[in-house]
Amino acid sequence: MAGRGDPPAEGEYPVNPEPSNRPPNGGLPGDVEPNHQDEPPPGNPFQFSLGELLLLLVLSAVALGSLQLLPAEAAAGLAGLIALVSLALLLTIPMPRPGLILAWWIILAIYVVTAAVALVRP
């Protein structure tokens, strides 16, 4: 092992034979060209209006209330059928609105809850 003032002996530390991807000036942050964009940054794709959320809340409450009129097994089957049909319809729409996607997730959650109730009830 070499002393402090001596140059390191060959094999004491690895030598990187590949060229570095860093720019010749060391890649300092001030040397980066600014990114000029004239278009605004994209917004959040899942933004809803208050009316859309209120409509989804009312429709899901009506759906849950009407499913209570059926036996548990029939309610779970009907909710599953509605979830499948709505998924098929959602896949046929080229660019569905975020409210429709949220509505499908609510339908799926209703199906999971009704299926769990159907399994637990005697």
Image (cartoon, grey):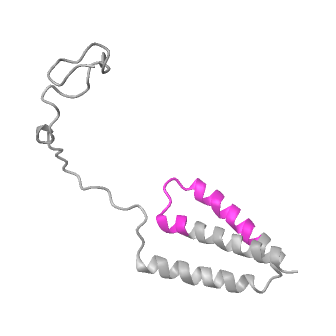
Q: Is residue 31 magenta?
A: no
Where residue 97 sits: x, y (%)?
A: 48, 63
Nearest the camera: 67 or 23? 23
Tell me which residue sits at (18%, 44%) in the image: 35
Where residue 3 sits: x, y (%)?
A: 20, 22
Q: In this view, does 103 lie to the left or right of 111?
A: left
Q: Does the magenta stretch include residue 98?
A: yes
Q: Quadrant of residue 43?
A: bottom left
Where residue 90 sits: x, y (%)?
A: 59, 59
Region rendered in magenta? 78-102
Where residue 70 sits: x, y (%)?
A: 80, 83
Nearest the camera: 92 or 69? 69
Q: Is residue 70 left or right of residue 56?
A: right
Q: Is residue 117 above or below residue 45?
A: below
Tell me which residue sits at (37%, 62%) in the image: 44
Q: What quarter of the picture does the C terminus occupy?
A: bottom right
